[in-house]
Image (spheres, grey):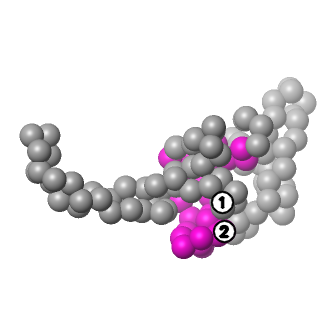
Amino acid sequence: MEKGLHVKKNDQVTVVAGKDKGKTGKVLRIDRKDHRVIVEKVNVIKRHVRPSQKSKGGIIERENFIDVSNVMHFCEKCSKPVRVGTRTLEDGKKVRFCKKCQEVLDK
Ligand SMILES: [Zn+2]
């Protein structure tokens, strides 16, 4: 995991700020440079697309980036957003865990 980013692709996260506050979804994309993420069904923007040879046009809905600081890990066991810590296992592997219930999030 890269420094400064607490989420990985396919993590379950909850939005804790902004217009989509409270929504939970899967991380689809990560922009490491700008510390932004795309979360499934979060910050959806509608774009009107003109008909072209490739498509017949219409309205396309697409997720847009949100700042990584606006999301928190969603712990299934706690069923709410939680803080995450990291610990090193005996075999040297680093895993993330829920600070509330201690459940390991990296399987
Ligand atoms: Zn938990």
The local secondary structure at tag 1 comes to strand
Q: Residue at x 65, y 53 (%)?
A: 68
Q: Position of residue 59 (x, y in %)?
A: 23, 61
Q: Residue at x 24, y 59 (%)?
A: 48
The residues colored magenta run 5-28
Q: Which residue is the site of mark 2?
A: 16
Asked whether, in this view, residue 42 is left or right of residue 16, the answer is left
Q: Work out whether residue 77 can be spotted.
A: no
Using the image, tell me which numbered label, if any, was put on residue 95.
Answer: none
- Closer to the N terminus: mark 2 or mark 1? 2
Q: Position of residue 17 (x, y in %)?
A: 64, 69
> Does residue 19 belong to the magenta stretch?
yes
The local secondary structure at tag 2 comes to loop
Q: Residues within 10 Å of mark 1 (few under 14, many from 20)?
A: many
Residue type of the residue flagged with mark 1: Val
Q: Residues within 10 Å of mark 2 (few under 14, many from 20)?
A: some
Q: Position of residue 20 (x, y in %)?
A: 54, 70
Q: Residue at x 77, y 37 (%)?
A: 3
From this view, report whether residue 79 is shown above or below residue 61: below
From this view, report whether residue 60 is shown above or below residue 23: above
Residues marked 2 and 1 touching at CB (< 8 Å): yes
Picture quadrant where residue 75 is located: bottom right
Q: Which residue is the site of mark 1?
A: 71
Most extreme residue toward the top is 91
In this view, the residue in front, 85 or 2, is 2
Residue type of the residue flagged with mark 2: Val
